[in-house]
Image: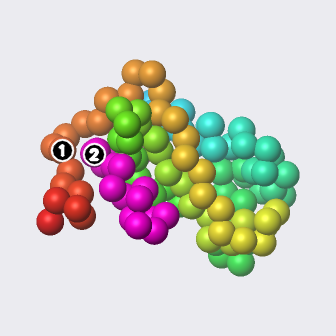
Amino acid sequence: MGEIENYLSQIEQSAIVKRNSKEWRYMWKKLAEKDINKRCKDEPTVCENGYEIWQYMGSFKIKGKWLHEFRHRWHPITEARVYFKISASKNYKPIGKKRRLLSDI
């Protein structure tokens, strides 16, 4: 099993955090605190490079723990693709229906 397949097989549940919610602000603040982002010339939650910026990819529950995943396709400091998984706040609870996973289809 490859790295991606292994990661996907561990996902118990997925969710999307509501924009501008308390959790939304929390996770973007945590992303901004990463050392690599503090060195960007613009906002640490943007880090624009050739029209590429940080993107929120979704939230995933793995081994009972919620993680928020971010991707930057071409980070200005590394000049490469970068992923970060940010641990959810202690009070985070996804809102809405349980989302189906690709492995359930």
Label 2 with label 1: CB-CB less than 8 Å: yes
Judged left or right of residue 22, residue 44 is right
Residue type highlighted by circle 1: Lys
Judged left or right of residue 69, residue 78 is right
Q: Where is residue 62 in the image (x, y as percent from the top left)?
A: 38, 41
21 vs 12: above or below: above
Crowding at label 1, few (<14), some or many (≥20) Cα neighbours within 10 Å?
Answer: few
Distance of mark 2 from mark 1, alpha carbons?
7 Å
Element at label 1: loop
Judged left or right of residue 60, residue 32 is right
Camera-nearest residue between 61 and 21: 61
Q: Magenta stretch: give its range.
A: 1-19
The circle on residue 13 is 2
Question: Can see residue 16?
Answer: no
Residue type highlighted by circle 2: Gln
Q: Position of residue 46 (x, y in %)?
A: 66, 57
**Tag nearer the camera, 2 or 1:** 2
Q: Where is residue 55 in the image (x, y as percent from the top left)?
A: 53, 60
**Count of residue discs:** 2
Camera-nearest residue between 4 and 16: 4
**Residue at 36% in and 49% down:** 10
Q: Residue furthest top?
A: 91
- The residue under label 1 is 98
